[in-house]
Image (cartoon, grey):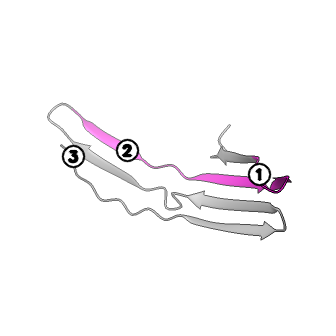
Amino acid sequence: TVNAWVPEFNLGTYFTVKNLQLGISANNITSGKTSFNTSVAKSEIRFSRYYMANAQYSLALGKKFTLLPGMLLKTDFIY
C-alpha cells in the first residue's frame, strides 16, 4: 500500500444567459506529482493539467417537458 498527499487546485466558472448555459474550468492547475519506492521499482505518478468547456441549451417541449441538449469538451492541448 502506498499513501501520498498531493495538493490539487481547480478553477471554473459558469454563465447563464436566458436558455443558454456555458461553463469553463481548469483542473489540476499545479500539475502535481508524487513518487514512491517499492521493493521492485521506483515509481512516479504525474497529475496533468486539463481544461473543460461545457454548454447546455434549454428547449421547452410543450408545458410538461423540457429538452436539455448539451456538450462537454475536455483537452490538455497536447497534440
Highlighted range, magenta: 41-69
What secondary structure is marked by label 3?
loop
Residue at 49%, 65% (x, y): give it. 9
Callout 1 amino acid: Phe
50 magenta-colored? yes
Indicate whether 43 appears above or below 27: above
48 magenta-colored? yes
Mark identifier at residue 2: 3
What secondary structure is marked by label 1?
strand
Q: Please tell me which residue lies in front, 55 or 12.
A: 55
Question: Label 1 near label 2: C-beta < 8 Å?
Answer: no
Quadrant of the snapshot with the C terminus: top right
- Position of 62 compared to 38: left or right? right
Mark identifier at residue 65: 1
Disc 1 or 3, which lies upstream in sequence?
3
Question: Label 2 near label 3: C-beta < 8 Å?
Answer: no
Callout 2 amino acid: Ile
Would you identify the image quadrant in which residue 22 lies? bottom right
Residue at 77%, 53% (x, y): give it. 66
Callout 3 amino acid: Val
Coordinates of residue 76 in the picture (x, y in percent)? 62, 46
Query: Disc 2 designates what residue?
Result: 45
Distance (Cα) linking label 3 and label 2: 12 Å
Coordinates of residue 35 in the picture (x, y in percent)? 30, 48
